[in-house]
Image (cartoon, rainbow, N blue to C red):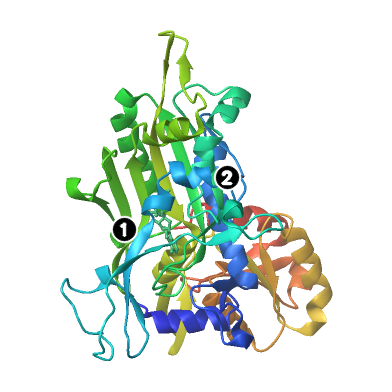
Amino acid sequence: MVDMETLTSLCKRRGLIFQSSEIYGGINGFWDYGPLGVELKRRIKEHWWRYMVLSRDNVVGVDTSIIAHPQTWVASGHVANFSDPMVDCKKCKRRFRTDEFPEGTKACPDCGGELTEARSFNLMFETHVGATVDSGATAYLRPETCQSIFTQFKNVLATSRQKLPFGIAQVGKAFRNEITPRNFIFRSREFEQMEMEFFCKLEDSQEWYDYWVNERLSWFHAIGIKKESLRLRPHASDELAHYAKGCTDVEFEMPFGWSEMEGIANRTNYDLTQHQTVSGKDLQYFDEASKSHFIPAVVESSVGVDRTLLCVLVDAYYEDDVEGDKRVVMRFHPSIAPVQVAILPLSKKLDEPARKLRQDLRLEFLTDYDDAGSIGRRYRRQDEVGTPLAVTVDFQTLEDNAVTVRHRDTTKQDRVALDQLKQYLRDKMQEWK
Ligand code: GAP
């Protein structure tokens, strides 16, 4: 399996991910996505949105503000409880989460220095809204995207013509002042989440929970993650929040061990009840059939975009030999690859027909154009950024109106007539294994 250092340097070299504010020495826990990274990320989010929202009758989307009324975080329990226990080393000044090392540890694991007493540290980033910086103006950058789904439940219900059971989905930024951000983009301080809250009757919640656990695992398969790299980990009863009836993590085998990608949870009717109590607004659902009012239960699916992207990178990384030449190849599934088709003219003299072809293909596919260096080097470059198919325009193209298509994984080549090319590319991507 690829190690994190190799992956991080590939990401930098190929314009996927850079350290944030690198020219100032960086800032811990923050990352910037480059030209290819932003495409990969966008495609993961779009795939999720199509799978979770656009392909279903009973899930709708929202896009809510990052800063919400501070009472939101009182009701959700984040103001009181969203904290990690931490200690500082008095000698080297390093900061640790106490749950990172064995209970009873008294000395710094790095330098042996004395540790401070454990204190609890709230992970929410505070800010101030308006011109005055007083405690009345304190607000928080959201640590998860789902709370506004709960606070907007009634508005969505009233305007979307949905009836139970139905879901509300959102993709957006979340912020946590993690004590020890690490493992590249796995645990950062600014990240994106894709969350869906599925509202249903309490008595149906177990059935929907089972349904969504399976659906969510299938999504990871649909973006091309190998089945053997994933597993489901149901939480033991002593891990569950007091209100939760069940929680299962989708875990992926990272270079640093099996790690949580996503949590699917049966949260009963806790969240809406909390917001109803703190806001004093009626958040009940009226059920026509039974003529009764009640607070719906919710099954949550919550996955990190950046964590999924890391999982995609680790899973796609391969090194192999092509005719005695070592190559690195990212085997991205065409449904999320940042470039789907590269157009490579064999000579600069073929610029005109090759660019014309690109103009035509880019209407339907994500394309790249590369005319620099030998064809072998260009293939390697495309392999390293995971482009599934490369189209070579050569001098014969001018005579036979055909091009050569090379497949990334097998390196096999086919000669394809230009008027068949789009259908050929479509078919190959559709049947991709
Ligand atoms: N609304 C439920 C919730 O936020 P969570 O387990 O705290 O649950 C859900 O977070 C997902 O968000 C995680 O499984 C992970 O993919 C992602 N995530 C959480 N903290 C993260 C961090 N510091 N950096 C990157 N991704 C994170």
Question: Residue drawn 60% across and 26% down?
Answer: 160
Q: Which residue is mark 1?
A: 251
- Dot placed on the residue nearer the N-terminal end, 2 or 1: 2
Position of residue 407 relative to residue 111, above or below, is: above
Residue 127 in percent (x, y) is at: 59, 60
Residue most extreme to the right: 352
- Given the image, on which type of amino acid does mark 2 rest? His
Query: Is there a contact, CB below 8 Å, between mark 2 and mark 1?
Result: no
Where is the N terminus found, in terms of image quarters?
A: bottom left
Q: Decide: few, some or many residues near mark 1? Use Cα within 10 Å; few <14, some 14-19, many ≥20.
A: many
Q: Quadrant of the C terminus?
A: bottom left
The kind of residue on which mark 1 rests is Glu
Relative to 149, say whether 392 is above or below: below
Q: Residue at x 59, y 72 (%)?
A: 32
Tell me if I can see residue 51 in this picture. no
Question: Which quarter of the figure has residue 138?
Answer: bottom right
Residue nearer the viewer, 154 or 302: 154
> In this picture, is 286 found above or below 431?
above
Q: Nearer the viewer, residue 279 or 45?
A: 279
Q: Quadrant of ligand 1?
A: bottom left
Disc sitting over residue 89 in the figure: none
Q: Rounded to the nearest whole Å, what is the CA distance between mark 2 and mark 1?
A: 33 Å
Q: Position of residue 141 (x, y in %)?
A: 55, 56
Q: Can residue 188 be seen in this snapshot?
A: yes
Q: Are there few (<14), some (14-19), or many (20+) residues within 10 Å of tag 2? A: few
Q: Is residue 73 above or below residue 393?
A: above
Q: Which mark is residue 69?
A: 2
Tag 1's secondary structure?
Answer: strand
Q: Nearer the viewer, mark 2 or mark 1?
A: 2
301 left or right of 97 in image: right
